Every structure is written in structure tokens, then in C-alpha cells.
Amino acid sequence: MTTTSTTGQSSPAYRPSTAKRAQLWLASHFAMLSAILVLLYLFLPVAYTFAFSFNDHGKTNIVWQGFTWEHWQDPCGVPGVCSSLVTSLQVGAISTLVATVLGTMMALAMVRYRYRGKAASNVLIFVPMATPEIVMGAALLTIFVQGFSNVGISLGFTTIVFAHIMFCLSFVVVTVKARIQSLDPRIEEAAQDLYASPVQTFWKVTFPLILPGIAGAAMLAFSLSFDDFIITNFVSGNENTFPKFVYVASRRGIPAEANVIGFSMFVLAVLLVVGAQLVGSARASRTKE
């Protein structure tokens, strides 16, 4: 391609050099490349977990020895792995239920009502989130040993549940509170103007609107509870949860059965998130229609 100058002579069109074109391409694709690199970095341990769930290992699952389906066919083949998983699921379910109910009520009170000490409660709700887990675990251990021993409760399943409710509660309050603050209070006032009682207003207007926030808070609380090791290690006594089992097993090489369960939980979490996104998109499209 050529261009004609004012003197009537043609000159070749400007073409950037290869280095310049590479710079322009990198500049236009920098965000995409950065996102790909970050995702690869984040999912590298997940890929390792998935790959070594098929490892035909001996005593340790550190070096690749060969491919096998055996571990996927019998995930409970290693003693203690499935019992610890059941314990973690039970603790997560109970602590999530209690923390979600209490946290939702606290969030409603902190947003919709005025009371003495409201500003202080808004600040103090962040203290458990900001406290290092090792400090909280040591403090809870002291409380449970000195207080619960007097009523006949020893370290174990009960103390784990109490500890998980305690640190999950703040995350539920913050999540649900953000959802409530985004709502227009005039919607509730309109329902009351139409002779709806406070109970009817809550269940028919407020609760459906804040339900996505409650569901998100519940999933966050369950993931935090299921994944916790530091606090659990302080207050669990002889009770074994799945993270605690993995930590003990890591000293001699995590068995492939633990990798099978870990990757399965990851896939389940991804499916739940994708399902929630699809439900939210469907509800948004119906609202627009």
C-alpha cells in the first residue's frame, strides 16, 4: 500500500516494526493475559490434587508412581478419612445454620433499628475477623478448658461447633448487612401502608429480597467452617476433622483418597456457585420481563 505526497510522488505506507506491533498487542491484551496467569497460579494446587488422586503410590503420595482408578473407586480406603469428612460436614452444617440465623437477626437489628451502642457494635463485629486465628484459638482453648470443664463438657465435637459459630458469625453479619443496606426501606413502608403486619412484611417482602445475601453468607460460613484448621486444632481434643486429618497425614504424604475427597468438594463448591449464578441470572431476566 502506498500514499501520494504533495509532489505527486508515491511513498510506502508506514508499517510499525515487529517489536512495536508486539508492544501494541501486549498492551491491548494485558488484562486478559494477567487474568489467565492469576487463574493458572490459583488453580495449580487444585490441578496437583486432581492429578495425584490417580497416583498409584506406596507409603507416600509425593512422587508420581503411575496411574490408577483404585482411589476413586474406594475413597474411604484409608482409615479415618471418611469419618473425619463426616465430622467436618456435621460441624459445618450446624455452625452454618446457627451462625446464619443469629447473623441475619443481628444484621437486621444493626441496619433497621436504633439503639444505644450501635456504633460500637458496628466496630466490634469486625474484631473476630481481624484477630489472628492462632490468637483466637488459644483464647478459646483457655475459655473452654476453664469454663466448659465445670459443666462436664470436654474438648471435642461440641467445642468445635461453638468455636466455628463464633468466627463464622461476623462474616454472616457483614455479608447480610451489606445486602440489607442496598435495599430501599420504602418498599417495607409501602407494604405496611397496605395493612401488612410486621411479620407479613418480613416474610413476604424483606426476606425474599435479602435471601440471596443470606444464601451467600451461609455458603461462606460453611466453607470457612469446613476449611478451618488452626482454631479447630486448639479446641478439637481427640476429635478429628478433615483438615486436621490432612495435616497429620501430610507428614508422611497425603493419601490419594484425601485428594479424591478434596477435589470432589472443590467441584461441588464450583457447581453450587455456578448454580447460584444461573438462578440469579434467571431471576434478573424474569424481573426485566
Image (spheres, rainbow, N blue to C red):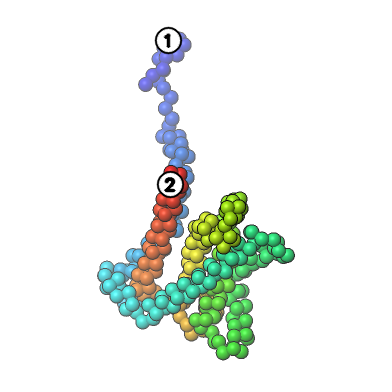
Q: Against 166, is 186 above or below?
A: above
Q: Quadrant of residue 143?
A: bottom right
Which residue is at a point 61% across and 89% down the rendered structure image? Answer: 150
Q: Residue furthest right?
A: 116
Residue on which the image places disc 1: 8
Residue 90 in sight from this viewpoint: yes
Where is the C terminus found, in terms of image quarters?
A: top left
Q: Is residue 85 left or right of residue 104?
A: left
Which residue is at a point 45% across and 9% down the rendered structure image? Answer: 7
Q: Residue furthest top?
A: 7
Label 2 to label 1: alpha-carbon separation: 60 Å
Q: Quadrant of residue 8?
A: top left
Residue 218 x, y percent position in the rendering? 50, 65
- Tell me if mark 2 has few (under 14), some (14-19) or many (20+) residues whose alpha carbon lies within 10 angstroms of its own: few
Question: How many labels were placed on the picture?
Answer: 2
Q: Which mark is residue 51?
A: none
Which residue is at a point 40% across and 20% down the rendered structure image? Answer: 12
Secondary element at tag 1: loop
Tell which tag, 2 or 1, sits nearer the viewer: 2
Callout 2, which amino acid? Ser
Residue on which the image places disc 2: 285
Q: Is residue 153 left or right of residue 241?
A: right
Secondary element at tag 2: helix
- Tell me if mark 1 has few (under 14), some (14-19) or many (20+) residues whose alpha carbon lies within 10 angstroms of its own: few
Callout 1, which amino acid? Gly
Query: Is there CB contact under 8 Å for labels 2 and 1?
Result: no
Q: Nearer the viewer, residue 30 or 212?
A: 212
Q: Earlier in the sequence, mark 2 or mark 1?
A: 1
Q: Against 235, is 7 above or below?
A: above
Residue 127 x, y percent position in the rendering? 64, 67
Q: Quadrant of residue 231?
A: bottom right
Q: Against 134, is 176 above or below?
A: above
